[in-house]
Image (cartoon, rainbow, N blue to C red):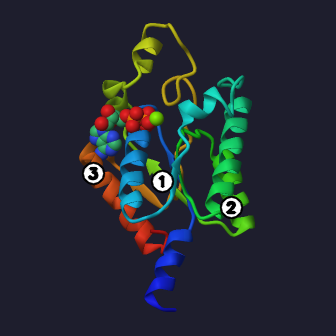
Amino acid sequence: MDDDEKQREKHVTGATVWLTGLPSAGKTTIAYELAALLGADGHRTEVLDGDEIREFLSAGLGFSREDRHTNVQRIGFVAELLASNGVTALVPVIAPYADSREAVRKRHAAEGTAYVEVHVATPVDVCSVRDVKGLYAKQAAGEISGLTGVDDPYEEPASPDLRIESQNQTVQQSAAALHALLIEKGLA
Ligand SMILES: Nc1ncnc2c1ncn2[C@@H]1O[C@H](COP(=O)(O)OP(=O)(O)O)[C@@H](O)[C@H]1O
Ligand SMILES: [Mg+2]
């Protein structure tokens, strides 16, 4: 393979990168930072953000266990389609249940599509101080219930490909660590 061919090949290697973690853990921020790094290298990327997806693809779904599972399966389906067509699909979505994430991973494996699981493992006490969308405050005030990590389950990934401790590093360091992993795996 000559250099031009290698370059073309690089640009068609797709993958799904799922960033799971609590609200305000840093999933969305890291996804967009990584998208900028990948874009600068000529990769096609798409960020499938949980909140945006819920407005369209998952409109009508709520936050019950069943609906959260359906939401994750739908997003996983779209991510796999993108990834199998050479796009790096970045998925900053809570995905609180291990079996939902496992089903997505298995679908990717069955299709021979690369799948990378990242646990953005910011502790709940840090997330609740960041409280980007005010959800922790609303839960504390009794205005909402079913908040992941507080009064709704979050099943931590047992063996993610990468665990990011965002409370101990900058956004740039977190994105760079993930970028380095993708390069190591031949996906960036
Ligand atoms: N290392 C880091 N990685 C990601 N976000 C961080 C980091 N350090 C601080 N933050 C801040 O934490 C917040 C995370 O918000 P967001 O990305 O919307 O979380 P999520 O998508 O997980 O709900 C942002 O305000 C971001 O600037
Ligand atoms: Mg987010």
Q: Find out if the beta carbon at label 3 lies less than 8 Å from the nearest ligand 1 atom.
A: yes
What is the distance, in whole Å, between disc 1 and disc 2 at their CAs?
15 Å
Q: Give the Cα distance between marks 1 and 3.
A: 16 Å
Residue 11 place in picture, x, y as percent: 51, 70
The image quarter containing residue 162 is bottom left
**Is residue 156 something that shows in the picture?**
yes
Dot 2: few (<14), some (14–19), or many (≥20) neighbours within 10 Å?
many
Find residue 138 and report its horizontal and vertical position in percent. 44, 12
Q: Mark 3 points at which residue?
A: 172
First along the sequence among labels 1 and 3: 1
**Foreground residue, 30 or 23?**
30
Residue at the spot x=56%, y=43% of the render? 48
Q: Nearer the viewer, mark 1 or mark 3?
A: 3
Nearest to the observer: residue 67 or residue 187: 187
Q: Earlier in the sequence, mark 1 or mark 2?
A: 2
Q: How many marks?
A: 3
Q: How far apart are marks 3 and 2 (CA)?
A: 28 Å
Q: Which amino acid does label 2 sit on?
A: His
Q: Where is residue 182 in the image (x, y as percent from the top left)?
A: 44, 66
Residue highlighted by disc 1 = 118
In the image, the residue with mark 1 has its CB under 8 Å from the nearest atom of ligand 1: no
Q: Which amino acid does label 1 sit on?
A: Val
Q: Position of residue 76 (x, y in %)?
A: 66, 48
Residue identified by numbered label 2: 108
Residue at (49% x, 69% y) in the render: 187
Label 3: state its secondary structure: helix
Indicate the amino acid at tag 3: Gln
Secondary structure type for disc 2: helix
